[in-house]
Amino acid sequence: MLVEAYSPLATGGILENEDITQMADKYGVSVAQLAINFVLQNGVLPLPKATHQAHIENNTKLDFEISPEDMQALNAMSGTDMG
């Protein structure tokens, strides 16, 4: 059974989160790319919604790995941390 993440960007809520933005900057990626890769690294299938071609293309550029420490920090965040 494969679990699917319906809204890996927390319905856009994480886009304004300073901690997540700083972490994305650390990896040289967008917040959306960080969120999608986070979901994948947790073994869950992401289902991001994108309507602009540039966003769709960027969502596929996931050639980086989030460190175990950063994965732990992201997993520790609650839904209320997402904006």
Image: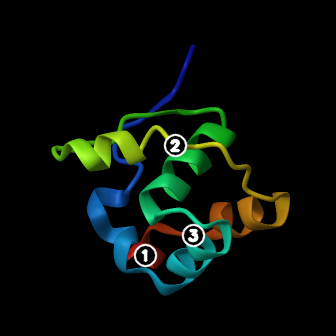
- Residue 59: which quarter of the image? top left
Task: Select label 3 or label 1 by which is in front.
Answer: 3
- Residue 15: which quarter of the image? bottom left
Task: Report x, y in % for residue 38.
Answer: 60, 50
N-terminal-most mark, 2 or 1: 2
Using a 10 Å C-alpha cutoff, classify the residue at mark 3 as few (fewer than 14 neighbours), some (14 to 19) or many (20 or more): some
Horizontal arrangement in the rendering, residue 74 relative to residue 3 (left or right): right
Task: Select label 2 or label 1 by which is in front.
Answer: 2
Q: Amino acid at mark 3?
A: Ala
Residue at figure coordinates x 52%, y 27% from the top left: 3
- Residue 51: which quarter of the image? top left
Task: Report x, y in % for residue 63.
Answer: 65, 43
Task: Select label 2 or label 3 by which is in front.
Answer: 2
Q: Alpha carbon of mark 2 to alpha carbon of mark 1: how far?
A: 28 Å
The outermost residue toward the top is 1
N-terminal-most mark, 2 or 3: 3
Q: Quadrant of the C terminus?
A: bottom left
Q: Amino acid at mark 2?
A: Lys
Indicate which disc residue 24 carries: 3
Q: Amino acid at mark 1?
A: Thr
N-terminal-most mark, 3 or 1: 3
Indicate which disc residue 61 carries: 2
Residue at figure coordinates x 54%, y 74% from the top left: 20
Horizontal arrangement in the rendering, residue 67 relative to residue 52 (left or right): right
Q: Does dot 2 land on a helix, a strand or a loop?
A: loop
Q: Does dot 3 land on a helix, a strand or a loop?
A: helix
Horizontal arrangement in the rendering, residue 34 relative to residue 65 (left or right): left
Using a 10 Å C-alpha cutoff, classify the residue at mark 2 as few (fewer than 14 neighbours), some (14 to 19) or many (20 or more): few
Q: Alpha carbon of mark 2 to alpha carbon of mark 3: how far?
A: 13 Å
Q: Disc 1 marks which residue?
A: 80
